[in-house]
Amino acid sequence: MKANYGYMDGSGEYYITIDTDHCIECAHHGCLDGCPKGMFEIITDDYDDEVAQIKEEFRKKIKYDCADCKPVKDRPPLPCQEACTPGAIEHSW
Amino acid sequence: MAEREFWRWKEYNWHDENIDWKGCDTITAGVDVGSVSSQAVIMVDGKLYAFASTRTGSDSPQSAQKVMDWALENTGMNLDDIHYKVGTGYGRVNVPFADKAITEIACHARGGNFMYGNTVRTILDMGGQDCKAIHCDERGKVTNFLMNDKCAAGTGRGMEVFADLLAVPIEDIGELSFDVEKEPPPVSSTCVVFAKSEASGLLRKGWPKNKVIAAYCNAMAHRVVTLLERIGVEKDFAITGGIGKNIGVVKRIEDELGIEALKADGDTQTAGAVGAALFGKALLEKSRKS
Ligand code: SF4
Ligand code: SF4
């Protein structure tokens, strides 16, 4: 399942997409420690699979919470994406 | 005399008198406690038996109890006769009698699959205070979802505010929105607060009410189409939630997408509770096997 967390507003679209099909097979859950803001958590979803999600309290302000990882110039690889070796995480901006 | 509440939509209950639940093997219930409205659905052997739809009060557990009691009214059934109960919606963890809580995203997909058939692949749920775009497979399992709950634009609450502002009963808004000579451009703001002041400004400028309504429905449709486009629209397409009953918004969404939405037999507002009751059936059967 592709789960999109975030929002769109007048300034743009800010979504983090987690492809939870990768999470089902993932043993290390690198996203948990990989994100310096601690935005990820592991839950048992509605289909009884253990998957990652963005914590509720971050969902309406991810543009601001992720800002430190996204300098305007010379953007380095995102820590969450580097930590997620199965490649489940995408950002829309 | 009490002031008329133009936002107030129809609250009602129903049950199928042709079903004798006493001889049934599975009786399950789904209770969808949303931020604006609550629905309870009872299914017997996977068939829709009874439901109630009412406004959510300030206390979620009480609202859940009230809507469940109303669904049970005149059925001869008690809460204890129901084998498995699932809570869903914004207040899902506050349904005191629920055996399990399941997200409204999964429930709308499953309920949409039941109400519209297993060809439905995209569901737009236009709820009281949020909007969800959901892709699902032929079993009603979610494959992709996106939610907008950051603002009330494109939601039932936004429409209620608008109905009160224009002093037009909410049920009439859809039809009236077509009573215009030419489709006006959408109100430019997507924010309910600004859209409201923009609409007041248009009325002061002399725009007829129907034209303002059309402009608002147009804006709401455009707003949710933008949301849908983020995950794409796969056919078949269906709209659930209270706004699914507003033809003025539904038709404009269809026109903008170039896709006709499937028409439901039942009340689009009950889709989440139907899905919850179906999850209840699956979970009950699983527990009986183990
Ligand atoms: S590291 Fe990636 S695949 Fe593993 S749980 Fe986290 S998001 Fe899912
Ligand atoms: S960009 Fe940074 S703050 Fe945002 S989710 Fe990834 S690691 Fe966390």
Image (tube, coloured by chain):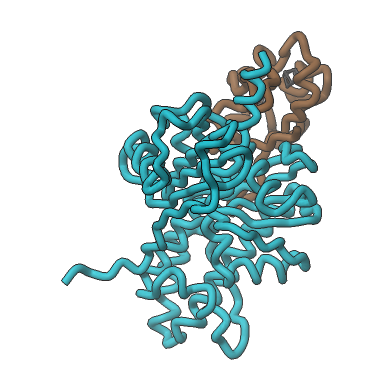
Image quadrant, ligand 1: top right
Q: In the image, residue B223 lies at what x, y percent?
A: 61, 60
Q: Image point 42% across, 54% down: which residue?
A: B13
Q: Image point 59% across, 90% down: which residue?
A: B181
Q: Image point 42% across, 87% down: which residue?
A: B206
Q: Is residue B238 left or right of residue B274?
A: right
- Name the image quarter holding residue B262: bottom right
Q: State which chain is coloured cyan.
A: B
Q: Is residue B26 left or right of residue A51?
A: left
In the displayed orientation, state which residue is furthest to the right.
Answer: A86
Do we see residue A64 in this rendering?
A: no
Closer-to-camera residue (A48/B205): A48
Q: In the image, residue B151 lies at what x, y percent?
A: 50, 50
Closer-to-camera residue (B84/B107): B84
Q: State which chain is coloured brown.
A: A
**Above or below, A43 relative to B174:** above
